[in-house]
């Protein structure tokens, strides 16, 4: 509850809240909707593959930064499925969603320490001390 975003995330809830949240989420994953998601993912993959080919031709094809490409691809797919907003992080890496996403998953400094503690300490620790995992500016 100390973190308004993660405190409501299905992964961090228990009991009745978890059951209610899961029953509300299940209809989003019907066979038909999963096929539609696959088609969307396929379109984004085609764009990413085009980017890989262009970069390989330009740079001689010797070395590619796959982590960065997959981070951008994941950002595009997640944003499209979650918010219905089409962005193109593969070709426009400085968009707002990409910048905010990097802030959310930063694993350095205090943010990294919070993520580490989240894996080893009970949730009540964060709730009692009112420690936010996700920075207020990012929500």
Image: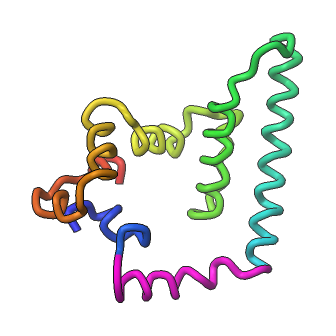
Percent position of residue 92, x then y = 65, 34
State the predominant SS element of the stretch in magenta.
helix
Residue occupying image coordinates x 77% and y 56%? 41
Q: Which region of the structure is painted magenta?
A: 14-31
| 18 is within the stretch colored magenta | yes
Percent position of residue 78, x then y = 61, 56
Colour pattern of the rendering:
rainbow
Front-lying residue, 8 or 121: 121
Above or below residue 17? Residue 115 is above
Quarter of the picture containing the N terminus is bottom left
| 44 is within the stretch colored magenta | no
Residue occupying image coordinates x 52% and y 46%? 97
Quarter of the picture containing the C terminus is bottom left
Above or below residue 121? Residue 84 is below
The reply, left or right, for residue 7 in relation to residue 26 is: left
Percent position of residue 94, x then y = 55, 32
Percent position of residue 86, x then y = 67, 53
Residue occupying the far front of the picture = 120
Q: Quadrant of residue 46?
A: top right
Residue occupying image coordinates x 34% and y 62%? 5
């Amino acid at each position: 509850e100390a973190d308004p975003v993660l405190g409501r995330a299905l992964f961090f809830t228990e009991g009745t809240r978890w059951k209610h949240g899961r029953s509300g989420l299940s209809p989003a994953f019907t066979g038909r909707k999963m096929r539609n998601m696959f088609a969307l993912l396929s379109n984004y993959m085609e764009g990413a593959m085009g980017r890989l080919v262009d970069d390989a031709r330009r740079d001689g094809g010797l070395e590619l930064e796959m982590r960065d490409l997959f981070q951008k691809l994941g950002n595009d797919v997640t944003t499209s499925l979650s918010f219905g907003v089409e962005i193109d992080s593969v070709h426009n890496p400085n968009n707002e969603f990409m910048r905010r996403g990097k802030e959310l998953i930063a694993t350095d400094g205090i943010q990294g320490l919070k993520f580490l503690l989240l894996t080893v300490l009970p949730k009540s620790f964060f709730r009692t001390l009112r420690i936010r995992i996700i920075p207020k500016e990012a929500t």
